[in-house]
Image (cartoon, rainbow, N blue to C red):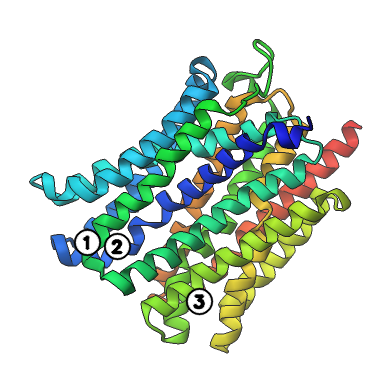
Amino acid sequence: MTAQSKYRKTLIACYLGFVTQAIAANFAPLLFITFSRTYRLTIEQLAVIPLTFYLAQLVTDLAAAKFADRIGFRVCVVASQVLSAAGLAALAFLPDALPLPLAGIIAAVILYAVGSGLIEVLISPIVEACPFENKDGMMSLLHSFYCWGSVGVILGSTLFFVLFGTQHWRILAVLWAVLPFVNAFNFISCPIERLVEDGESMGIRQLFRTPLFWLLALLMVSSGACEISMAQWASAFTESALGVSKTVGDLAGPCLFSVLMGISRAVYGAKSEKLDLVRTMLCCGLLCFLCYLLASLASSPVLGLAGCALCGISVGIMWPGSLRISSQKCPKGGTAMFALLALAGDLGGSAGPALVGGVSGASGGDLKTGLLAATVFPVLLTVSLLILKRTVHRAD
């Protein structure tokens, strides 16, 4: 029996795990206007929802670095699916059950954010531990399912609202919760290997004392910032640049961005054996820089949209590629390394959009100026890769 056939169920469970994370990250933002109208929430109150999601995910990343190995991968990854399902289902009931609807929303968000954080920490090392020959391709293909999940939740939710109306969003929340609930049973029974043998993995303190780890962390911060800065602001940028409705803006902005990002990861997954990962990422860093420039400086709205969309291609392999490089250069990093790298990626994913928003606000609401400031992130990525390449070359 080949590794591919033996671990097929593991791969399917991990693919669906990333789809679950995409649902957790993208479903609630689609309901912001509905929440505002139904529960009379202000913009400031709505802003607490994504802030809570990412803070809870960051805390989970940090905590998982300590407890995941002790508790065991299987228990933690099953918990990730159960918590995600419980949080999505709770979103349909808690806002109406509690005296303060926002408190109900936040409680539900925390539940599925903890699940999402565990997914982020555990899924990649689970696949990394499987004895596949083409690890680069497997990792890239794995992460493409987050993109397909993002596209699916945007298109699926939009279609549901068109057919049945936004007033039935609670039903849709429960329907989305079914996927992680079913996937929990996949993780209960699928084969899961250890990434590093007991006693051989590096601890947090040991990683912090390793200069290479900080370079890898910077690579993850840059990757997260490059991806999420454009992903989070794509809808608003498309609406403001093209003057279209929110529905069209969501489809032309973040949805198209996710499609191209998924295609990028899938294509690299198929062609990875013929490509050098570091060189490919260097090319992607340059393309990302050019895409941000095009989006921010183009006078034509169509060219600006092209820069936004093509950015999806450029950032596609950054996150999975950074994880794969880290595993290659620091093979005994173990779960702690993956957890801390996930934390670094999330920090970049928080800092990048914050920089775009802050600079845009300071310039009178001009998103193009904010996106221009974000060009610093692909530059950081490229510099990190060059230093890494030079350092490893010297070591060899």
Q: Is residue 224 above or below residue 59?
A: below
Is label 2 in a helix, a strand or a loop? Answer: helix
Depth check, front residue: 320 or 96? 96
Identify the residue at image location x=42%, y=73%.
Answer: 236
Q: Nearer the viewer, residue 74 or 217?
A: 74
Residue on which the image places disc 2: 31
Give the residue at the far left of this rendering.
99
The x and y percentages for residue 4 are: 74, 37
Q: Give amino acid for label 3.
A: Ala
Residue to which mark 3 is pinned:
252
Q: Are marks 1 and 2 in contact (CB under 8 Å)?
A: yes
Instruction: Give the mark nearer the N terminus: 1 vs 3.
Output: 1
Residue 111 at x, y percent in the picture: 32, 38
Q: Is 178 or 78 nearer to us in this picture?
A: 178
Give the quarter of the image for residue 153.
Answer: bottom left
State left or right for residue 184 relative to residue 141. Answer: left
Q: Earlier in the sequence, mark 3 or mark 2?
A: 2
Is there a contact, CB below 8 Å, between mark 1 and mark 3?
Answer: no
Residue that mark 1 sits on: 35
Residue name at image x 50 percent, y 45 percent:
347
* Label disc, if present, on residue 371 of the rendered structure: none
Q: CA distance from mark 1 to mark 2?
A: 6 Å
Q: Give residue 361's position: percent from left, percent from top.
A: 38, 69
The outermost residue toward the bottom is 300
- Residue count near mark 2 (Cα–Cα under 10 Å), binned few <14, some 14–19, many ≥20: some
Extreme residue in the top direction = 199
Q: Whole-Å distance between the Cαs marked 3 and 2?
A: 18 Å
- Vertical position of residue 245 compared to residue 51: above or below: below
> Residues under labels 1 and 3: Cα distance?
23 Å
Q: Position of residue 245 (x, y in %)?
A: 37, 82
Position of residue 46 in the picture relative to residue 373 (left or right): left
Instruction: Report the amino acid beneath label 1.
Output: Phe
